Image: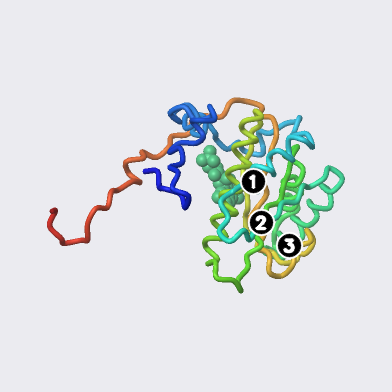
Amino acid sequence: MARKTDRGAVPSARPNVALGRGGDGTETAAWICSRQSTSPKLLAPPGPEEAELETMIRAAVSAPDHGRLRPWRFIRIADAGRDALGELFADAKRRKDPDCSVADLERERDRAARAPGLVAVVACIDCSCDIPEHEQFISVGAAVQNLLLVAHAFGYGARLVSGAKTRDRQLCAGLGLNAAEELVGFICIGTPVKPARHRSRPDPGDHLSVWSRLPGREEQ
Ligand SMILES: Cc1cc2nc3c(=O)[nH]c(=O)nc-3n(C[C@H](O)[C@H](O)[C@H](O)COP(=O)(O)O)c2cc1C
């Protein structure tokens, strides 16, 4: 319901519709639901151009953000940095699993090279402020989703990947993170080599309930 503003005017209940961008939302919702992650193994060139990536980041940093803390940071991994990132991945694997095989290390190096576009997502959580940490992490997640949706809008396939290595502090330091920052993962972006297999989605009814009174109270 539209609330009165301080000046007494009743704002449009649906300002986006007034701007001609809303409709009934069904089409936009269907389009959002059409986004599916693509395995980095199925991502080929071309990846996003500089301007497209900037547009993705613009959408990402428009995410809901309690207290305007901007609890995120994005690092584009340049092509020139792929080999060095591969070595960081291999070193992290060696630290976690000292008995790993040469093939395991090669697989880790390969992960750094797969997707044409690669963006590290960093959570910069401020533990000293009044905004709870979980709210800040939610902002980071929303930023990731905005980025994924814009990648989808440009026709790219993408997936957020993480793994144990994201918790390896030496790897994080190698990427330039400070001790207070968390490496959430990497967003892999590229051109899907084949259409994604349809992924079933949960039934909204299984995830929505309605609250109208305290438990145990009779209906009025
Ligand atoms: C924080 C986070 C980390 C993830 N890490 C991985 C990962 O390491 N490997 C992976 O295959 N999927 C990972 N996923 C899941 C994928 O990003 C993706 O959500 C999943 O494949 C489902 O695909 P969908 O986006 O089409 O629903 C992660 C998701 C989140 C939110």
Question: Which quadrant is the N terminus positioned in?
Answer: top left
The label shown at residue 155 is: none
Residue underneath mark 3: 172
Q: At x 53% / y 27%, what residue is drawn?
A: 20
Kindly identify the amino acid type of the residue bearing the numbered disc 2: Trp
> Which tag is nearer the camera, tag 3 or tag 2?
2
Which of the 4 image quadrants contains residue 2? Answer: top left
Q: Residues within 10 Å of mark 3 (few under 14, many from 20)?
A: many
Q: Quadrant of residue 140?
A: bottom right
Residue 212 higher or lower than 99, as above or below: above
Mark sitting earlier along the chain (3/2): 2
Residue 119 in the image, given as x and y percentages of width and height: 72, 47
Q: Position of residue 59 (x, y in %)?
A: 64, 42
Give whichever of 137, 198 is nearer the camera: 137
Q: Earlier in the sequence, mark 2 or mark 1?
A: 1
Mark 2 — residue?
72
- Rendering coords of residue 43 (x, y %): 68, 34
Q: Quadrant of residue 56?
A: top right
For the point 65% across and 57% down, the residue is 70
Binning the other alpha carbons within 10 Å of mark 1 as few (below 14), some (14 to 19) or many (20 upward) gives many
Above or below, comparing residue 67 to residue 141 in the picture: below
The residue under label 1 is which amino acid type?
Answer: Ala
Q: Is residue 138 left or right of residue 75?
A: left
Per the rendering, the mark at residue 60 is: 1
Could you tell me if the residues under marks 2 and 1 are in contact, i.e. CB atoms within 8 Å? yes
